[in-house]
Image (cartoon, rainbow, N blue to C red):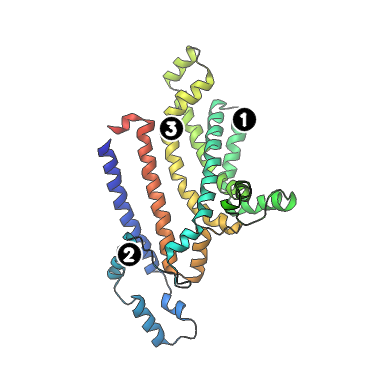
């Protein structure tokens, strides 16, 4: 078990180093001069050149990457070009909104998706199965911004049941916080739910055709116990895999959903930074999002050892 964990940790460290290099090179090769943007339209070439030198932009790419990476390792993601605030501080200010949205989405989507997938597998070939899979196809196919605007039009504008936009910090009360997250979480969770439900159904169908399931049925074991205790547990590894992979959908969806619902989260921060070419903020947010995705995938791999003890050896 320890050897397995160490191997996964080592591979994760290598992946993070490569991700850091890609993030740096992606912005290093992007057209545009941060010094010219910061200096303004009325700056002279001499002023821009001086600013470039002070920002270290005249150094070679390897030197800039090493300097940037050494600062990242120390927890310093740089300073915003426009606000002159540390990127870590800017992200910390907006972290609550993004984490709340992501956690609310997973809390709603994962149990619902597994329940739908198990139900569809149990009722395979029936109208229930067909309807559930049709809904999952529609949910997976629709872009998040289309779903978001539709839900706003129906529930916020027409029915006036929920707020149109905005975010209420948890300090203002759990009820108000949850009420503002309801539509954004539903928007972000639709694609996530559809993906997990389809994989759960396909995996459960394979397990339900195994001999030990037929043996359990012949012994008179209740169907609910067969589905939850025997079939679902043996289908756990593929389901855990798709839940981990689906985090990428959450990371991408957070940016769109926060923009649609005007939520002041990290997603909105990176959108604003891209519009202003605030490179330190863009690099910092992309790197943190990438690190979260890589670490969650490592946690998913480690969870396999709990679901299937054979993987430990």
The residue located at (49%, 28%) in the rendering is: 205
Assign the C terminus to one quadrant of the image: top left
| Disc nearest the viewer among 3 and 1 | 3
Q: Alpha-carbon distance for marks 2 and 1?
A: 55 Å
Where does the image place residue 260, in percent across and percent down from the top left?
60, 57
Q: Is residue 310 above or below residue 279?
A: above
Q: Which SS class for mark 3?
A: helix
Number of numbered discs on residues? 3
Marks 3 and 1 sit apart, C-alpha to C-alpha, by 23 Å
Residue 128, numbered circle: 1
Describe the element under mark 2 as helix, strand or loop: helix
**Which residue is outermost to the top?**
219
Q: Nearer the viewer, residue 304 or 94?
A: 94
First in sequence: mark 2 vs mark 3:
2
> Is residue 81 or residue 132 the one in the foreground?
81
Residue 113 visible, this orientation: yes
Mark seen at residue 71: 2
Q: Secondary structure at mark 1?
A: helix
Tags 3 and 1 in contact by the CB under 8 Å rule?
no
- How far apart are labels 2 and 3 at the CA level? 40 Å
Lower position in the chain sequence, tag 3 or tag 1:
1
Residue 236's disc number: 3
């Amino acid at each position: 078990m320890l050897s397995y964990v160490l191997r996964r940790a080592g591979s994760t460290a290598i992946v993070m180093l490569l991700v850091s290099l890609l993030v740096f090179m992606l912005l290093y090769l992007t057209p545009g001069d941060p010094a010219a943007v910061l200096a303004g339209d009325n700056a002279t070439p001499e002023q821009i050149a001086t600013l470039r030198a002070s920002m270290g932009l005249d150094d070679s790419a390897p030197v800039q990457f090493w300097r940037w990476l050494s600062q990242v390792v120390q927890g310093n993601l740089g300073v915003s070009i426009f606000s002159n605030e540390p990127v870590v501080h800017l992200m910390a200010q907006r972290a609550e909104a993004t984490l709340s949205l992501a956690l609310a989405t997973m809390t709603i989507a994962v149990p619902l998706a597994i329940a739908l997938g198990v139900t569809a597998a149990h009722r395979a070939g029936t109208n229930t199965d067909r309807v559930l899979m049709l809904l999952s196809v529609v949910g997976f196919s629709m872009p998040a911004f289309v779903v978001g605007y539709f839900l706003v039009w129906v529930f916020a504008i027409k029915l006036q049941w929920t707020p149109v936009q905005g975010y209420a910090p948890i300090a203002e009360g759990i009820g108000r916080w949850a009420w503002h997250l309801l539509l954004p979480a539903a928007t972000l969770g639709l694609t996530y739910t559809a993906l997990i439900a389809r994989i759960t159904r396909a995996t459960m169908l394979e397990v339900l055709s195994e001999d030990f399931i037929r043996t359990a049925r012949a012994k008179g074991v209740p169907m609910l116990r067969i589905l939850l205790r025997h079939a679902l547990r043996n289908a756990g590894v593929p389901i855990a895999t798709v839940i981990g992979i689906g985090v990428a959908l959450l990371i991408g969806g957070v940016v769109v959903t926060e923009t649609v619902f005007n939520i002041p989260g990290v997603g909105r921060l990176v959108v604003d930074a891209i519009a202003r070419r605030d490179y330190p903020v863009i690099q910092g947010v992309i790197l943190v999002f990438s690190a979260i995705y890589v670490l969650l995938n490592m946690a998913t791999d480690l969870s396999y050892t709990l679901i299937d003890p054979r993987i430990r050896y």
